[in-house]
Amino acid sequence: MNKKVILFSFSFILAFQSFSFEIDDNFHTGCPYDVFKIGDKIGMRFDNYYQVRNYNEYNLDSEGWYSTSYCGTKMYVIYGSNYFLYHSLKDIYYPESASEFNFGSSFIKENEYNKYIKDKSWWTQYWDSTVIVPDYLVEAGKNGKITYDTFDASHFYCYCNEVDVQLFKYNAIPWATSKEPGNMKIEVNLHDKTNSLVILNGYVHPDKRYLYKANRRLKKIKVTSPESNFSIISDFEDVVHFHEIKLPEKVKTVVIEILDYYEGNKYKDLCVQMIGKRNYVDIFNYEFDSLSFDRLSYKGRYKEYKD
């Protein structure tokens, strides 16, 4: 039997159910139960056990992914840039670096993704943006042409509950261009006014993790808006994470200019997996009462896992 390998990412996390999967032919989704953050530690319940780890126990590999193990199971983590992160109702925390641990997302294989959205449409919100690019890659695949346009990069879903969970299609195709990306401009219409822009940089695939470093990815961009006179320069840390850019005022449309990029170690295509915005949700005060890792044991039902 293949050892289970889980990929998921953390939202700030009161008590939060995320999706997980085995990276093999028997791929399925499931829930690793409660996960939450207190101070510089992350606690998680999995199967019949729970475990608490420090941030410094997460290791960065040569492919740009962080990983650790919980309850004997190796887990890959997508770091976040405050995408759905709340410290409290009044104080929203903005990390300066992806190395600060907070929010990520969930991948679901396409058939389950489509079924989930259909079955849960009454409580699942659809978030999208219109991304206009000057070029996108089209290449031959085993089953016909593969178009690396912006559709998957700008469409995603999330629960409409107290702590939203973003859902990504497992085989989502990134936007990619094979042309020289320097000074290329991308227009993003976010449909509603927002003061944040969130980008999942590079080619991010849960069981083809080498594709992140294999392709070009953003290194430095300039963000402007036709609705305002601000100009923001933003540098990307070269790890798989959600990169958030805070805007000085709310706008519907932004223009991204590519100033620099990381070279791929195999391909010349520049890729961006997702372009979107922060999603705000309501969290009730009682969620913050008596928050402790003791709740992972669920009154002694679950045992603490020891390495």
Image (cartoon, helix red, strand yellow):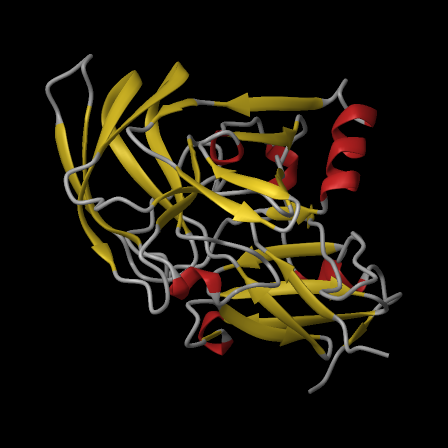
14 relative position to 183: left or right: right
166 relative position to 49: left or right: left
- Horizontal and vertical percent position of residue 280: 50, 27
Report the residue at 64% width, 22% height from top: 125
Report the residue at 51% width, 23% height from top: 128
Note whether 286 is above or below 206 in the view shown: above
- Horizontal and vertical percent position of residue 281: 55, 27
Rendering quarter of residue 114:
top right
Report the residue at 79% width, 24% height from top: 118
55 relative position to 163: left or right: left
| Front-most of residues 24 and 307 | 24
* Residue found at the far right of this picture: 301
Report if residue 271 is visible in the image: yes
Note whether 275 is above or below 241 in the view shown: above
Image quarter in which the N terminus is found = bottom right
| Front-most of residues 169 and 10 | 169
- Horizontal and vertical percent position of residue 65: 47, 67
In this rendering, the count of numbered labels is: 0
Image quarter in which the C terminus is found = bottom right
42 relative position to 17: left or right: left
| Front-most of residues 84 and 154 | 154
